[in-house]
Image (cartoon, rainbow, N blue to C red):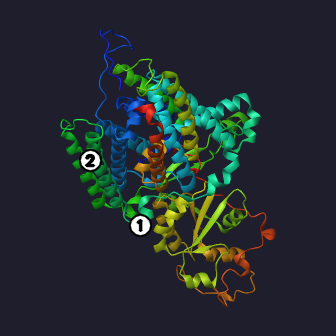
Amino acid sequence: MTTHTSAKTKKGLFNRPTKPYVHPYFGGMVLGIILFLAMFLTGNGLGSSGATSRIDAAIVDAVAPSHVDNTPYLLKMAGGDKNPLDDWIVPVFFGALLGGFTSGAINGRLKFETTKGPNISNKKRWMFSFLGGMIFLYGARMARGCTSGQALTGGATLSAGSWVVMLSIFAGAYGMAYFVRKMWN
Amino acid sequence: MNFPLQSFNAVSATNPWTYVVFGLIGFAFGFTLEMSGFGNSRKLAAQFYFTEMTVLKVMFTAIIVAMVLTFGASALGILDFGQVWVNTTYLSSGIVGGLIMGVGFIVGGFCPTTSLASASTGKIDGMFFIAGGFVGAFLFAETERFFDNWYNFSGYFGRLTLDQVFNIPVGVVVLLVVLMALFMFWGSEQLERIVGGRDMSNEPKLRLVGAGTVVVLAVAVILIGSPSLEQKYSRVEVKRTYIQEAPADATEEELAALEPVSVLMSGDEALQNREIQISPAELFTTLYDQKLHPVMLDVRPEAEYNLFHVRGAQNIQVSELSAFAKELIAEYTPNRVIVVMSNDETLSTQAWKVLVAESVANVYILEGGLNNWIAFFGADDPNIEGKVSNPLDEQLAYIFPAALGDRYECSAPDPQHNEELEFESKIQLELKRDKSGGGCG
């Protein structure tokens, strides 16, 4: 955990005094209310991994449009005159980036650093982070949603499939945790 | 006003506010994750070594709070749960994808949205995770074709909720999930104390008040129960779109500039204005329309159905429709048109009210019922023995010699002789939610 506190309390985005994180139950309650409002107003919950797919599709569509026509999965998002970025999840994705940044700025947590276990080098951590992102998003697209789209949103709407996905995520992570324990402890 | 708001169910360039609303939702989402400490991979990974259970606490608090509020609002009749996206159940791809995600979680230290909170606050590992994510999603798009059949069909159950799986009232499921979450919170705190060696004696007492409040709300959801059918029907809105009539002296540009107008009306107004009663000719044409997927529901008693029915119609009683509506919603396709029919319009109108109250999309009534259908298509059917004089309402007005069901000529009129039927078209597909849309998909 970062307990960095700058000696001088400079005004500015970086190096502000670091404030502690909120209590998990409080954070969870706020998140639950946001999730409820999202469902209440729009009928959609939260999510983000769909946006990664759609940004990918937009890039492929711009670089090699003919490839879109040969890839069934991309065709659904970017085929014909469809704009893959025309989906609610894309503004949610960019909003989340901005929201994270704002909270970091207010609470003095904007800092270029690497969060990792004590026994792993920065370079190794970056490598595994990249690899983990790759594996996670591959699985998220297969399961049609990630921890936000499936576990949170589907969990709250009592979707049977989402509860299965949620348990599978925990099972996969707990099952793998032993083998990568040196990375984190 | 009906929630969720139809106009915000997707982003659209014609309504720029949709981008603002979804952007704000994302903003609040990212903000909360960051302030809960999810920008730090070590805090997230600690969950899987039982030293710090923040992930589970935040996630399950969010789930139970959102769940209690959602089902509470639905029980009070403020929110139409039939219009809320419920992730479709695909067991096989869900399990395999979930296990893969778990591996990615512990190897990479993030999940997709937490990596956004992390990268946006300058964490370099978060940025690498996002970059890897783009590669992973790209690889999925490239490899999906090798298992698309399995991906799209294996273990597919449509829209399926836990109360349907266990066949218990939804309020009871809500309470059970709340109690399970509270038990897990208690267990997590024990683990943090024993495995994580943390001092838990200073935890705020307020959390017990919060736990009590959620339990009380969950019990309230059970006590309120589901809104009655009448309540649901009173909230039904039928959207009809008309082409504006142009003034006689309109120029071509003026004609081109005429926008269709949309009108919202209540269920009773739609019935009164005869907006949803389709003629036998329109139903017949629909049956041969490749773009549509018609479903005919014959709501008469079984004996009359056996005597005569339109070929392809399925027999179901009005009393069974509420339960059947759930199946219809689970199997929703955007091009499906449901046509309810009885001998006249009394029974079928009742059936229509039930289905629209249960949020089934694109339901229509056969105008004049089967009596009108037979008058239109069966005028010269040699097997029909004659007409009943002065039939009562909902009485079959024709005499059939035997219960031949759909083997009468006018059960399935010859399409070749009825190619150019003229009618006033009333079917307007209302797009609710696509199977591939919504959710994270």
Residue B214 vs B138, above or below: the answer is below
Which residue sits at x=62%, y=75%? B370
Q: CA distance from mark 2 to mark 1?
A: 28 Å
Q: Mark 2 or mark 1: which comes first in sequence?
A: 1
Disc 2 on helix, strand or loop? helix
- Mark 1: secondary structure: loop
Task: Please determine if labels 2 and 1 lie on a single subunit.
Answer: yes
Residue B14 at least partly seen = no
Q: Nearer the viewer, residue A147 or B335?
A: A147
| Residue type highlighted by circle 2 | Trp
Above or below, comparing residue B264 to residue A48 in the picture: below
The tag on residue B167 is: 1
> As displayed, is residue B274 above or below residue B27?
below
Front residue of B112/B73: it is: B112
Residue at image coords 74%, 74%: B413
Outermost residue, right side: B416
Foreground: disc 2 or disc 1: 2
Chain under numbered label 1: B
Question: Dot 2 falls on which chain?
Answer: B
Residue linked to disc 2? B186
Work out whether residue B30 or residue B147 is closer to the camera in this orientation and state it.
B147
Left or right, A17 with respect to B101, comes to: left
Res. A15 image quadrant: top left
Quarter containing the C terminus of chain B: top right
Q: Position of residue B126 (x, y in %)?
A: 48, 27
Let me know if residue B363 appears in the view.
yes
Please state the horizontal and vertical placement of residue B221, each as a whole percent of the image. 30, 56
- Label 2: few (<14), some or many (≥20) within 10 Å? few
Provide residue B344's location: percent of width, then percent of height: 56, 75
